[in-house]
Amino acid sequence: MAFLKRSPWILHYDASSCNGCDIEVLACLTPLYDVERFGIINTGNPKHADILMITGGINELNRAVVRNLYEQMPEPKVVVAIGACAATGGIFRECYNITGGIDKVIPVDVYVPGCAARPEQIIDGVVTALGILEEKRTKMRGNAQTKEEARHAAGEST
Amino acid sequence: MNGLIGAVLFLILAPVAGGLIAGIDRKITARMQGRVGPPLLQPFYDVGKLFEKENVVVTTAQNFYVLAYLIFIALSGALFFAGGDLLLIVFAFTLAHVFLVLGAYAVHSPYSHIGAERELIQLMAYEPMVILAAVGLYMVTNSFYVADMVATTVPVILYLPGVFLGFVTILTIKLRKSPFDISTSHHAHQEIVKGITTEFSGSTLGQVEIAHWYENVFLLGFLYLFFSWNPVIGIIAVAITYAAEIFVDNVTARARWQAALKSGWLAAGVLGLVNLAILSYMMTGGV
Amino acid sequence: MQTLLFLILFPILVACLLLFVKQTTLRYAVVALSALSIGGASIYLLIRYAFGGAVYFAASSEVASLAMVAIEMGLALFIIYMGAKFRNYLAIALAVVQAALVVYLEISFPENLHAVNNLFIDQFSIIMALIVGIIGSLIAVYAVRYMETYHHHHPEVRDRQKMFFFVTFAFLAAMFGLVFSNNLMWLFFFWEITTISSFLLIGYSETEEATKNAFRALVMNLLGGVAFVVALIFLAATEPTSGGIELSRVLASPDAAVILIPAVLIGFAGITKAALMPFSSWLLGAMVAPTPVSALLHSSTMVKAGVYILVRFSPVFAGTFAGFSIGLVGAVTFVVASAIAISQSNAKSVLAYSTIANLGLIAACAGVGTYMLVWAAILLIVFHAVAKSLLFLGTGAIEHRLGSRDIEDMEGLIVRMPKMAVMMFIGIAGMFLAPFGMLISKWAAIEAFVQVPFGLVFIAILAYGSAVTVFFWAKWMGKLVAVTRQAERVEKGFLEEPWAPLYIITGLVIAAVLLFPVISSTLIEPYVLAIYGATALLSQANVAIMLLMMALLLILPISFLLFRRSAKHLPVYMGGRPSTPDLHFAGSLGLTREVQTQNYYLTEYFGEARLFRPGAAVCIILILASWVLAGVAL
C-alpha cells in the first residue's frame, strides 16, 4: 500500500530567502489553498518529515544547517526547491556569501520556479514530488529486499 | 467471560475507532477554520506511512520504551473494557505514560528532554482529578469495578456534576488539545519542535500514534461512565463533550505549564473535591 | 522462645566481638557469618511461628528489668556527659527529665511494673523481624567494605570502625527486642537504645555538622522518649483498668478512653521517631552520616520502630478523633514531604523526603486504623523497607564511583554503570510504579479511606501526594536512563563494594511483588484478622492482573533483541546545527558549544523554604489537637 503518497509531511526551511516565497508556502496552509486536503502537514521537525521545502539561495552560515536537516530526515525523502533563488541563487546569485542554489549543497528532486513562486505552483511541485517519493519508496523496499536476500544467501553459504 | 470479550474487542476495535475519531476530529477542526480538511481516513494514511518509513533511531533503547508505552496503554484500556478495578487501571495508565517519558529521556536530546519534563508536569496536573473521579464513581455506584459502574441504574452525572466538569478540564490535557497541549500536540501544531516525540520517527512514531488512539477510546469510555445508566444519552453526551473539546482546542491559545498545573489542581480541588464533600455529606447526613 | 532470645542476644555478642576486630577481611567474615545466622534465625522464626496466633513468653523478669533500668541510667549519664562536652543543654535537660521520670515510675508504682509475659511474637513481629534480620544484616555486610572505601575517600575522619560496627549490631539487637517486647518497660528500654545508637552513628564523622545533626536527632527523639515515660506512668497509675505496662493487656483493655491517652503519648513518641513533620529535620540531618547508616535508619530500623508502635496501637486509635488527628499528621507529612522532594537535586535528600512522606502515609493509615488500613500500612512497611534500602545502598555505591550524589550527575548512568542503573531503576520503580509494592498499598489505602467517615480528606491528600510522587521519581529515572554517548564506563572502581547485598535486595524487591499475595495471606491477613475479626483481601482477579503486569515487565526487555538489527542511527536534532553525539554543537562565530539538560525542580512552587514551615505548623496543631481530643475523650 502506498500510504506515503497520501500523507506527505513537510519541513519548510528558509535558507536566506527574501521571505517572499516563504509567505507563499505558508499561504498554501491557509484555508484558501488548504493543503491538508491532501494530508500535507507542516511538521517543523526533520525526523517526522518526508518533503523538505526549501527557499532561498543558501548563504555560508546556513549551508551546514541545510545539510544537517537533510541528513536528519529518514528515507524516503525528497527535496523541493522553491523559487528562483532556491534554483539558481536568483538575484542574489552574485552576492559574496551566497552559494547559488540548493543543489550545490544537497540533491534536489523538484524545482518550483517563480519570484515569488505562486501557491498553485508550489502545490503542483509537491504533487510532482509525491511521484518521486513513491518511486524512492519502491526502490528502497527493493534495496532492502535485495539486501535481505543477499544476507540469506551469505548465511546459507557459510 | 464478558470481561475477556470486552478486552479483546477493545484491543481489536479501539485502534479503528480511535483513528476514525481522530479523522472526524481533524475534519471538524478544518470546518471550524473554514477549510475543507483532510479525508476521514487521513489518520490511518499517516500511521500507514510512518510504518513505511525507514527505521531511524538515536538509540535503540527508545524503541523499547515506546513499545512498552503502547503495550501498557493497550493493557490498561483492555482492563477497563474488561470491567476491571478502575484505580488499578488508572495506575497502569500512569505506568504506561512513565514509559513514554522515559523514552524521551533515553534519547538524551534537548527538545525531547523539555517535552519529557512537561509531560511529567501534565501527569502531575491531571492525576489528582482522575483519582478523585474514580473515587466519586465509587461513592455513587459502591464499587470500583468498571463492570458494576456500567451496570448502574443511577444517573451518576446528577450526583457528580462537579467531578464531571473537573474531569472534562483535565481531559483537555489528556487529549493533547489546546490550551494544555504543552508536552506535544496534534498534527500541524508545533511545540518546542515536537516536544516529547521529537526524536521518535517512522514506526516508533506510528506506535505512539496508535497508543494515543487506544488512549482516546479509553478516555471516552471513562466519560461514558458518568452517563452509563442510559446508553443513548451516554453516547450523545460523550459526543457532545468531545465536540466541546475540539471547540476549546480551536478557540484557545496554548497556555504555559504553570497554567496547566494550576488548572488541573484547581479542577480537582474545587470542582472535584467540593462535589465529593457535598456528596459524602448527603450520604452520611441521611438526606 | 530460644529463637527470640537468640535474635536479641546474638547481635549483642557479635557487637562485642567486633570491638576487637581490626582487620577488614576478618571483620567482613565475622559480619557476613553473623548476618547469615541472623537472617537464618529470622527465617526460622517465620517457619516456626507464622502459622499460629500470637505466642507469649514469660521470660524471667527481675534481673533483666533491673539491668535495663541500670543501663538506662547509664545512658542518661552518657547523654549528660556528651551534652556537657558539646554544650547542648537541651539534651541534658531532656535526659535529666526522662531519667527523673523513670526513677519516679520505679519508686511510685513498684507493684504495677510486673508483666506476666515479657516477650511475645505474632505475625506482625515476624514481619518486622524479617525486615531487621534480612535487610538490616545485609546493610551491615555492605557497610564493611563501604566503610573501608569511606575512610579512603575521607582521610580526615578518625577511623572508629570498631565502634561503628559495635553500635550497628547493638542497633539490630535493640530492634529485635523492640518488636518482641510485650512488656512496655522493656520496649521503652530498646526504644532508648535505638535513640542512642542513631545518635552515635549520625555523629560518626565528628565534624561540626555531624555533631549538630546528631544532637538534633537526639533531642527530638528524647522528646518522644519523655512522652513515652509519661505514658508508662499513666498506664502504671491506672493499672486495674488500663492493663498496666503489658502491651497485650493494654490493647485488650475494655476502657478505650483510659488507654487512649497513653496511646496518643506513645503515638507522639512514634511520630518523633518516624520523623514526621515537624520532626522531619532530624532524618534529613542524618544524611551527613555514611550511607549505610542512612540505609539502616530509613529502611529497617529506627523510623520503622516509630511506625511499628503506631501500627501496634492503631486498634486503639481506630474510630477516635485523636487517632484521626494523628492520621492527619501523617497525611499532611505525606503530601508536603513529597512536594518538597520535587525541589531537591541531592539524591540522598530526595530519598530522605520520600522516606518521610511514606512514613507519613503509614502513620495516616495507622492513625485512622480500620482493618483495611492496617493491612495497607503493614504492606507499606514491607515494600518501603526493601526498595528504600536498595536505593540508599545504590546511591552510596554511585557516590563512591562518580564522586557525587547529585541526581544531575547521575545522567547516563545506564551507560556508565549499567548494572547499578538497572538496580536503581528497579528500586525507584518499587517506590511508585504500578505492579510494584508501594503502589499496591497506596491503592489499597485509597479504597480503604473511601469507607471511613471524613476519609475524603485523606483521599484528596493521597491523590495530590501520589501525583507529586510520580513527578520526582520519574524525572530521576529519566536521568538514569538517558543514553549519553561517549561516556566512560566506571562500574569497576579501585575498591569494590560488595555487590552481593545489592543483588539480593534487588531480588527481594521483585520477589516482594511476585510473592506479595503469599506475604499477605500468611502474615498480614492473619494478624489483621486476629485483631479486628475481619481482614482486607485483594481480589484474585486483581492479583492476577498485577502478576501479569509484572510478567510483562520482566519479558519486555527481551524486545531489545528485535531492535538490534537494521535501524539507522542519527544524532539528536539540535535545531539544525551540526552536532556531536555528546551534545556539542557548532555555534556562531565558529565556536563549539555544549548543550546540557537539567531536570525541573520548580523551587518557586515546591521549595523547602516555601512549604516546610506551613506544613510543620499544621502538624504541630494537629499533634496538640490529638492530645486535647484524647483528654476530652477521657
Image (cartoon, helix red, strand yellow):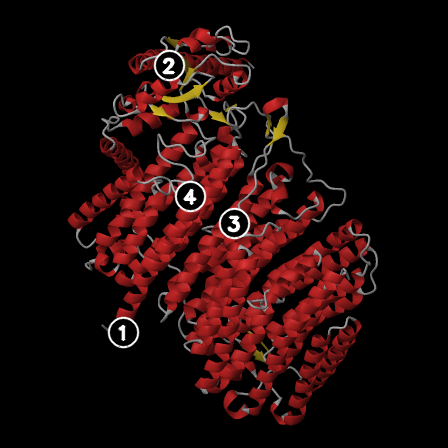
Position of residue B99 relative to residue C537, above or below, is above
Which amino acid, by three-letter code, is at mark 2?
Answer: Leu
Chain ID at mark 1: B
Q: Nearer the viewer, residue A7 or C383?
A: A7
In contact (CB < 8 Å): disc 2 and disc 1:
no
Q: Which residue is mark 3?
A: C602
Does any portion of residue B1 appear in the rendered image? no
Q: Which residue is mark 1?
A: B285
Same subunit: marks 2 and 3: no
Residue A133 is marked as: 2
Chain ID at mark 3: C
Q: Position of residue B32 (x, y in %)?
A: 23, 34
Q: Secondary structure at mark 4?
A: loop
Which amino acid, by three-letter code, is at mark 3?
Answer: Leu
In the rendered structure, the answer to whether residue B150 lies left or right of residue B91 reads left
Q: CA distance from mark 1 to mark 3?
A: 41 Å
Q: Secondary structure at mark 1?
A: loop
